Image (cartoon, grey):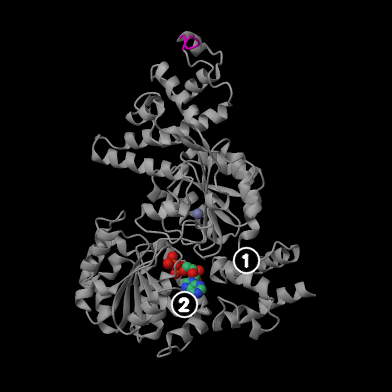
Amino acid sequence: MIDVTAAAPRHVLQTVFGFDDFRPHQEAIIRRVVSGQNALVVMPTGGGKSLCYQLPALVREGTGIVVSPLIALMKDQVEALRQLGIRAAYLNSSLTRAERQDVKRQLRAGAIDLLYVAPERAMMASFQRALGQIDPALFAIDEAHCISEWGHDFRPEYLQLAELRRRFPQVPCIAVTATADAPTRQAILERLDLGEDDLFVTGFDRPNIRYTVRPKRKARPQFWRFVQSEHPQGAGIVYCLSRKRVEQTADWLTRKGREAVPYHAGLSDAARQEHQDRFLREDDLIVVATVAFGMGIDKPDVRFVAHLDVPKSLEAYYQETGRAGRDGRPADAWMVYRLSDIVRMRKILQGDSDTRDEHEWTQHHKLNALFGYCETTDCRRRVLLNYFGERMEGARCGNCDNCLDPVDTWDGTVAAQKVLSCVYRTGQRFGAGHVTDVLLGRDTKKIRRFGHNEVSTYGIGADRSKKAWRSVIRQLVAKGLLHVDVTGYGALQLTEACRPVLQGDQDVQLREDPEPVAATQTKKAQREDFSDAPADQALFEALRTRRTELARKQDVPPYVIFHDATLRAMVEHRPDSLDAFRQLSGVGDVKLDRYGAAFLEVIQAHEA
Ligand code: ADP
Ligand code: ZN
């Protein structure tokens, strides 16, 4: 047990958490809450929200009460705190009655620094009585957007938390969330009776995530090249649209020698639970999943999120890719897509909504924004942030594919005219495949049947490859010059916007699709990472192995012992004494005592 009461926040930061300095905004928020005022913190995933309530709970007298809807996470969250020597506990339906009684007894005895509770339990009469007998240090409302009907994850039980505020007006309240647009923020402030002054909004940006989007050719080999070159180890999530693709992709990866497990709604609860547990507890596992996977996953060291099929909107994309790199270390968001995927998704979304109304229009609009993002030659981070109403400083982020490998563009006016005329001449009733065949002047049954070898555009595109025409068509759709009719077989149709192009009054700039050789390979060195020197790699491996041994013994996830960032710091600094070891980021007093010697031993063995 540690005695930190009345200690300065910075002292606690260094001795308990083992961090040198606060992240942007943390200090101001922490000081505010320590002084008894409130805060609503809107900060992206991985920004360091938890510290904003954990640290004040230690500095202030009494127990910090953390309300969270994510019951499945509580055990690991509490374990991570206990590893730091913090007296943490949780109360939820997964405990037996006796266990719950025990926690409440400790609560009354003042033996708990931080207590995690589910919202419905926080409102139970028995819990409220217990609260009445103690002095809560603060209330922290995690996932605070759940209180708003405007948010995407409204939970009625969250509305009752307003009552908690009325009963304990003197207890500071800190609400935190990663996703809250303006109406949602307003709703949180009102419901929790917070003021405008309490609001802290930091940007949405996740600078450590590198965004890459490639035209899909053969998704699996493309993905394989990517993981082999960028992530030969480490955990990742791969999203596919259907259960079947999920199963096949997981099998394929495992056969290739990279262990992967499937996750989708068709698996039994037990299988899903098992795969999720393995993901949390193993260092190098890949989960291949439908969107069913991810909510309530709190693994900090997910190194990549790959989309082999497109998500349904940029919001979904940002949320899914946001699961990468919560620890702030370099991570990848990697996606491949093709026109037919967008068309397929459009069909699915139309099928979803029974009424063809505003909702459908919104979905359509959102999918177009995603498509625009895929096709952009601009900085991807800029496009993303723009979409969420935020401006990026500077024109280029330097950490997306378009910034790292600026896209070549070419004058595609004539090519566009050829496609548009060909669509027109064949009656606007055929999809991209057939139109391409006509352009190429191929001899197919379909072409003969419809007499398309007679039209004036037959064979006018023989100067380019099939792949090149596919790329042109895809980009014309993205630019709104062609429309895909998804009510039938995906026929291409002209839009009003293509008139000036056909008349020669408007040029069309197209992007050169990158070649499949991983362009990212050359850029690897730019990541501020330790060198690829074999000795460094070997030491990192040995440290991971030691971490896994220690984690297994206690049946906890490895990252609660030390994050990868701390292991990397060990490789970089090669501490040779406990004193040197305690300088590493992520090493506080308790972890130094518990694990310092065990890791120093590994480092020394490597120096020898
Ligand atoms: P969030 O809840 O906002 O998603 P977390 O609180 O989980 O983010 O923090 C993300 C990561 O950043 C964690 O690995 C955490 O240990 C680390 N972290 C937080 N604050 C600091 C800091 N001041 N210095 C170094 N690392 C930090
Ligand atoms: Zn960029």
- Residue located at (59% from left, 26% from top): 465
Quickly name the residue at label 1.
548
Stretch of the chain drawn in magenta: 451-455
Asked if the residue at tag 2 contacts the one at tag 1, i.e. Cβ–Cβ closer than 8 Å, the answer is no
* Front residue of this view, candidates 502 and 321: 502
The residue wearing badge 2 is: 22
Q: Quadrant of residue 382?
A: bottom left
Q: Amino acid at mark 1?
A: Thr
Report x, y in % for residue 558: 57, 66
Residue 12 seen in render: yes
Q: Residue furthest front?
A: 505
Q: Is residue 452 magenta?
A: yes
Q: Quarter of the image for the C terminus: give it.
A: bottom right
Nearest-to-viewer mark from 1 and 2: 2
Residue at coordinates 48% horizontally, 16% vertically from top-left? 457
Q: Is the CB atom of the residue marked by disc 1 within 8 angstroms of ligand 1's nearest atom?
A: no
The residue sitting at the bottom extreme is: 6
Give x and y (percent) for residue 63. 35, 81
Judge left or right: residue 104 versus residue 196. Answer: right
269, above or below 496, in the image:
below
Residue 197's quadrant in the figure? bottom left
Dot 2 beta carbon under 8 Å from ligand 1: yes
At label 2, the amino acid type is: Phe
- Asked if one can make out residue 113 in the rendered structure from this viewpoint, the answer is no
